[in-house]
């Protein structure tokens, strides 16, 4: 079956602009996670959805970051007033129910803020 | 807070055995997961230990000692395709906290 997909694969934007990153999880996976990964580092947790609701958003670095999952499937990560420090690979993962220990990751979106 | 320590780099010979250690400090520990990530690729799940002991999955095994806050990933019969980064990750209440990863290089 299809895995987790993310679009776009690459996004280049200018400082101060707004960006949206999309994640399409594996069908039937109720849990969805967003991470960001900088070069040489492990994935850093941002937010976790169980169904439509954000069950844990403690990893969002500040209020410029926001994510939604309105129908409990596709999710969008939104970043306002982008800064150069936001440049990273943004990874999305999904899992069955609360099997958060076994997450299936998408290929990521490489965000570059100039 | 949470912290994980694992070696930054390991080099091993094709066909050999390599062990990647992971020590952690955390509250609310539920288990230890291991993920593999090739350059430019997505992390892929390898194993999960909730209880003390060894879990074996083919050429890969993972061990956990909760009393020592320690675990390791054991890779046997190394192949060139095993060259990748390996991350241990602590499972908390509803998410994973990843270490900085160990870059494994397999040489002929």
Image (cartoon, coloured by chain):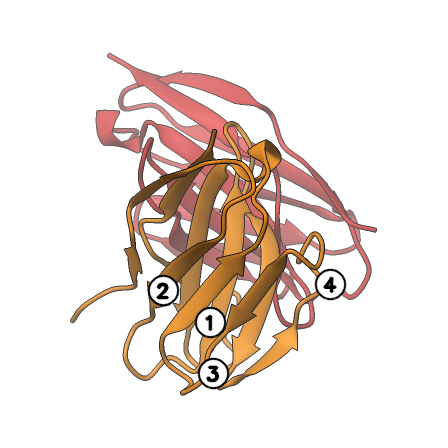
Chain colours: A orange, B red
Residue A40 seen: yes
Task: Look at the numbered disc 3 and give the secondary structure of its residue.
Answer: loop
Report the Cα–Cα distance between label 4 and label 2. 28 Å
Seen from the viewer's position, the closer of residues B42 and A36 is A36
Chain of the residue where label 4 is placed in the rendered structure: B
Q: Callout 4: 10 Å neighbours few (<14), some, many (20+)? A: some
Residue shown at 45% from the left, 84% from the top: A70
Q: Is residue A70 left or right of residue A64?
A: left
Report the Cα–Cα distance between label 3 and label 1. 9 Å
Q: Name the residue under label 4.
A: B29
Report the Cα–Cα distance between label 1 and label 4. 21 Å
State which quadrant residue B18 falls in.
top left
Q: Is residue A16 above or below residue B30?
A: above
Task: Look at the numbered disc 4 and give the secondary structure of its residue.
Answer: loop
Chain of the residue where label 2 is placed in the rendered structure: A
Report the Cα–Cα distance between label 4 and label 3. 19 Å
Seen from the viewer's position, the closer of residues B31 and A46 is A46
Seen from the viewer's position, the closer of residues A94 and A109 is A109
Specify which label sits upstream in the sequence, 3 or 1.
Answer: 1
Specify which label sits upstream in the sequence, 2 or 3.
Answer: 2
Residue A32: image tag: 1
User: Could you say where residue B13 lies in the image, as x and y percent from the top left?
Assistant: 33, 16
Q: Name the residue under label 2.
A: A23
Seen from the viewer's position, the closer of residues A12 and A50 is A12
State which quadrant residue B36 falls in.
top left
Q: In this view, does B76 lie to the left or right of A32?
A: left
Q: In this view, does B39 lie to the left or right of B81?
A: right
The reply to whether dot 1 and dot 4 touch (C-beta < 8 Å) is: no
């Amino acid at each position: 079956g299809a895995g987790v997909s993310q679009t776009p694969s690459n996004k280049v934007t200018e400082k101060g602009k707004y960006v949206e990153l999309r994640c399409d999880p594996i069908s039937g996976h109720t849990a969805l996670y967003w991470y960001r990964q900088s070069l040489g580092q492990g994935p850093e947790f941002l937010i976790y959805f169980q169904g439509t609701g954000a069950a844990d958003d403690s990893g969002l670095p500040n209020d410029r970051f926001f994510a939604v999952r309105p129908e409990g499937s596709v999710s969008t990560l939104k970043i306002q007033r982008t800064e150069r420090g936001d440049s990273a690979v943004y990874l999305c993962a999904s899992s069955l129910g609360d099997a958060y220990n076994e997450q299936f990751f998408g290929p990521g979106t490489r965000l570059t803020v100039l | 807070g949470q912290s994980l320590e694992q070696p930054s780099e390991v080099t091993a010979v094709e066909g050999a055995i390599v062990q990647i250690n992971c020590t952690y400090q955390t509250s609310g520990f539920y288990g230890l997961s291991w993920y593999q990530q090739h350059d430019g690729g997505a992390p892929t799940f390898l194993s999960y230990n909730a209880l003390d002991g060894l879990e074996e999955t083919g050429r890969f095994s993972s061990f956990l000692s909760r009393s020592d806050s320690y675990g390791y990933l054991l890779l046997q019969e190394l192949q060139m395709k095993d060259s990748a980064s390996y991350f241990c990750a602590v499972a908390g209440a509803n998410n994973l906290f990843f270490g900085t990863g160990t870059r494994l290089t397999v040489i002929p």
